[in-house]
Amino acid sequence: MAEEDQMGERPAMDAAMDTMPPMERPPMPPMEGANMKRSSVEMPPEAVARLMQPSQEIGAVLLARIANMAPEELRMIDSAITPAVADVLMKLLPELQQIISQVGGQRQEAPAQTEMGALSGM
């Protein structure tokens, strides 16, 4: 909620606010300007382009997590992620594009495993 003190506990005022009936609470402070602006609007195009580049470290973490998933979990992911959702996820995590490409290459080498989707080679 608010800042925590050194011991990780909430200040007494915040704790009192939780127990105070809603009608007795002080009014909320003005919230003008509290909404975050889109960072791409404020960033130069070069910075946005760098931001959207895949990270090798994040890719390695994602690959390790996928490798530790059970086959039924991979099947659930394959059945739940539609091509449209995959496009949006790849915008959020461009590292997924590289992983999907790697897995796709593995599937072409071993076409006998066709029961799972894009992550079947994991």
Image: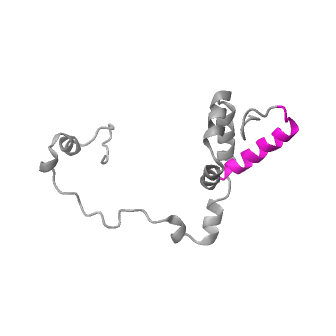
Dominant secondary structure of the residues highlighted in magenta in the image = helix
Q: Quadrant of residue 51?
A: bottom right
Number of marks: 0
Colour scheme of the picture: one colour
Q: Is residue 122 placed above or below 49 in the rendered structure?
A: above
The structure residue drawn at horizontal position 82% and vertical position 39%, both measured from the top left corner, is 106
The reply, left or right, for residue 97 in relation to residue 19 is: right
The structure residue drawn at horizontal position 67% and vertical position 58%, both measured from the top left corner, is 53
What is the magenta range?
Answer: 93-112
Could you say where residue 44 lies in the image, as x and y percent from the top left? 58, 72
**Residue 12 counted in the magenta span:** no
Q: In which quarter of the image is residue 114?
A: top right
Residue 55 seen in the figure: no
The structure residue drawn at horizontal position 77% and vertical position 41%, both measured from the top left corner, is 103
Residue 79 seen in the figure: yes
The structure residue drawn at horizontal position 35% and vertical position 62%, both measured from the top left corner, is 34
76 vs 97, nearest the viewer:
76
Q: In which quarter of the image is residue 21?
A: top left
Could you say where residue 48 lies in the image, as x and y percent from the top left? 61, 65
Could you say where residue 58 lies in the image, as x and y percent from the top left? 64, 46
Could you say where residue 3 lies in the image, as x and y percent from the top left? 31, 47
Which quarter of the image is occupied by the C terminus?
top right
**Residue 106 counted in the magenta span:** yes
